[in-house]
Structures are given as C-alpha cells and as structure tokens.
Image (cartoon, rainbow, N blue to C red):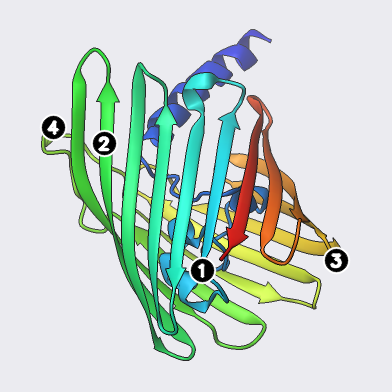
Amino acid sequence: MVNKFYFSVIFLVSYTSVYSQHNLVQAGSVSMATGNASVAQINAWSAFNNPSAVCFDSISSFGMSYENRYQIKGLSRGTIALNFLSEKTAITIASSYFGSAVYYDARLGIGFNRKLDKNVSAGVQLNYLNTQIKAYGNAATVVPELSLFFKTAKKISFGIHTFNPLGAKFKENPNSQIASFISVGADYKISKFTNIYLAYSFGNYQNGSIKTGLSYQIADNMKLYLGLDSNPFLFAFGVDFMLNKKMHLQIAAQYHNYLGYQISPGFMGGF
C-alpha cells in the first residue's frame, strides 16, 4: 500500500510537469475516448489534433470540452475549438486553459490550412502560450505547429502533426524548454458503422507512445468509443449522443491503474 502511494505521488508530479508543458495537445472528448489516437480523425477537435484535417470536413464546426483529471482541481482543463471552412481552405482557432489561480497555462492558436489537391491538405498554426506561477510571475511566447493530411482512399486516411518543431522557448527564461512532439496516425473505416484509429507520438518530454481506438455506431443517434494509450498506459471509453445532424453531446473517460479516472464531457456542432 505504501509503495503504491509513493508511486502515485511521483507519477502525478511528473505527469503534471509534462502535461503543463503543452505536450498533450490532443483535445476533445472523442480524442480522449479513443486513447488520443486522433491525428487522422476529422471533426471539430482537429483544430488541436491535426488542423489540416479540417479541410476535409463537410461543414464549419465548433467544440467545447472540460477535462477533470483524477478529481484534482489543479489538473482541470477547458478547451474551445472553432473552424471556418471554405471550398479549399480552413481557418482554425484553438484555445485552452489548464491549471488554477496559483499556476496556469493558457494557449490561443490560429491556423491557416489548405487543400493541395483532392486528397492532400497542409496547414500551419501559430500558438500564443502563456504560463503563470503566482509567486514568480508569467512567461509567454509564440509556438508554431505544422500538419499534413492524406486521404488515400474512401476508407483510409493518414495524418502527420508536429508541435513546436523549432524548439521555441520562453523569452523570460531561455533555459526553459517547451515540449516538442510529432504524431503520425491513420483512420481506417472498416464498415459504415465502424472505424479503427492508430497513432504513434514522441517528443522531448515523453518517450514514444502507441495509441489505438475504435468507434462503433450502435444506433442512428449514438456512437460508442474505446481506446488504449501505451505511455502512460490508459484505458479509454466514451459515448457520443447525436442530438441532430449537426449537434453532438459527448462524454469520455480514461482510467489509470494508480490514479483512477479522468472525465471529459464535451459538446460539438456544425454551422
């Protein structure tokens, strides 16, 4: 029992450090429910997970979600995504807030994405990052991210997404290191009702992680999700209630063997 307690404390401290460095850029209840295997998914949360994928969405979209990580207030995160879609281009806006009044990280990203041909799109997004520790002040910088999306067939798509490829640092602390990472993944549509997601990501703050997910539409207005993330090992699940053709209410959860559950309700819609 004592060993388990100390392991939980050590893991939680290291997890908070990594998470607060913006390397868990994946956002949205669907991403959480599919084990964060979201780099090749197309939905409102692509503004975080792979902005160039928005070019292949059918309508402009928005999303809002809240993550309660292990019932600890200081690890809560709120996110908002907003995507404006035209025939060949998409403007993406991604905003998130993590932490509390004592310590927080905030992010605001604006991206431009364009179809290069009928099967390929690319995008660049600039993110303003602001970190504040109440006792020490705040630091801010601008971090780029790049993304590619390939739709090789009606049933298969691939995504590549890199965050902070230039290794940007906070100007106030040149010795600081903001997380850099790259994710690659695929979405395979097995049937009209079932999709499989697979992704691999790695970066300077985290060793490689294999992520896999599954979605299954069990009714006209309901979809179920399952997922696994290998580092740290997490089991994920969720449900999507389709309120109408454009509006979705989503609830997702991930389970860690030592720390327990983290819950994410969310809302996604089109316009």
Q: The disc labelled 4 sits on which kind of residue?
A: Asn
How far, Cα to Cα, is label 3 from label 1? 22 Å
Q: The disc labelled 2 sits on which kind of residue?
A: Asn
What's the residue at 80%, 63% (across, down)?
A: 216
Please tell me whether mark 1 sits on a helix, a strand or a loop.
loop
- Reading the image, the residue beneath label 3 is 220
**Mark 3 or mark 1: which comes first in sequence?**
1
The mark closer to the camera, 3 or 1, is 1
Q: Nearer the viewer, residue 252 or 17?
A: 252
Residue 174, image x and y in percent? 11, 36
- Reading the image, the residue beneath label 4 is 173
The mark closer to the camera, 3 or 4, is 3
The mark closer to the camera, 3 or 2, is 3
Can residue 35 be seen in the rendering of this structure?
Answer: no
CA neighbours of label 4 inside 10 A, class few (<14), some (14 to 19), many (20+): few
Residue 219, image x and y in percent? 88, 63
Residue 71, image x and y in percent? 61, 22
What's the residue at 85%, 66% (across, down)?
A: 220
- Reading the image, the residue beneath label 1 is 60
